[in-house]
Amino acid sequence: MNLRTCRHSLLLAALACCIAAPGCARDDAGAAGGATQPPATSAPPPAPRASMEPDTTNAPIERAAPPTLQPVALGRFTAADRVSAAMTGDIDITDSRITGANGADFVTERVAIVRGGDEFAAAQRYADVMRVDAGHPVELRRVLDEVRGADGQGFCNSMKTGFLALASYEEAGMRVVKLMALQGDGIPAATATDTQLCAATSYEAAR
């Protein structure tokens, strides 16, 4: 065997060993794959909003309206005891006024619906004065303006009436209305410091 033939045989043997070896095949495949794979690219970031105004593509948030305070009694009622006859006589109750037959007139605003068991002052409950159950609704109105009756007598004597509280129920075919007059500027509550009971009256109307 001459030198050229020997070199040719060694070259063929080395090539056969490389093809049979797994590492050599993986390197060739990786090199071939890397050559054909396109370079990785990243998407450009979204453009910033040109304005901070609300996004009109989204539906607006809907908020529930606050509940409306319902009156416990409306209409004309007859004085049912001596106190109510002296203080107001018969009364007309509307959404914003309580007017007596003797000329007394109260411009009011409805501020809350409380319960008979609530206290309008420390240890003093609406239920105990009005003779209603603890769970009975009581309408609380702030007095915005007051005109005294012809005799000049008011619910709170010489002091301004601060609040009027109303409760109503049916009894023996009659609609009964209980009215409390309170003195004081702060909202009647167990912690109130200036709330005082001025008068408690009763009225009724045939059903």
Image (cartoon, grey):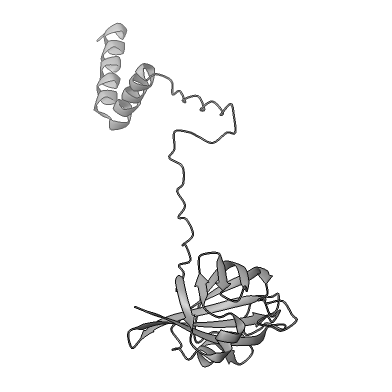
Give the total number of marks visible in the rendering: 0
Question: Residue 12's quadrant in the figure?
Answer: top left
Residue 149, given in percent of the width and then of the height, sits at 65, 76
**Whether residue 143 is situated above or below residue 204 in the rendered picture:** above
Question: Residue 137's quadrant in the figure?
Answer: bottom left
Residue 94, given in percent of the width and then of the height, sits at 50, 66
With 185 as the anchor, is 166 left or right in this view? left
Residue located 29% across and 24% down the image: 18
Dividing the image into 4 quarters, which one contains the C terminus? bottom left
With 148 as the anchor, is 73 left or right in this view? left
Dividing the image into 4 quarters, which one contains the N terminus? top left
In the image, 107 versus 64, the foreground residue is: 107
With 30 as the anchor, is 51 left or right in this view? right
**Whether residue 102 is situated above or below residue 37 in the rendered picture:** below
In the image, 33 versus 7, the foreground residue is: 33
In the image, 111 versus 98, the foreground residue is: 98
Residue 171, given in percent of the width and then of the height, sits at 36, 87
Residue located farthest toward the right when viewing the structure as drawn:
158
Residue located 45% across and 70% down the image: 75
Residue located 46% across and 25% down the image: 43
Residue 74, given in percent of the width and then of the height, sits at 45, 70
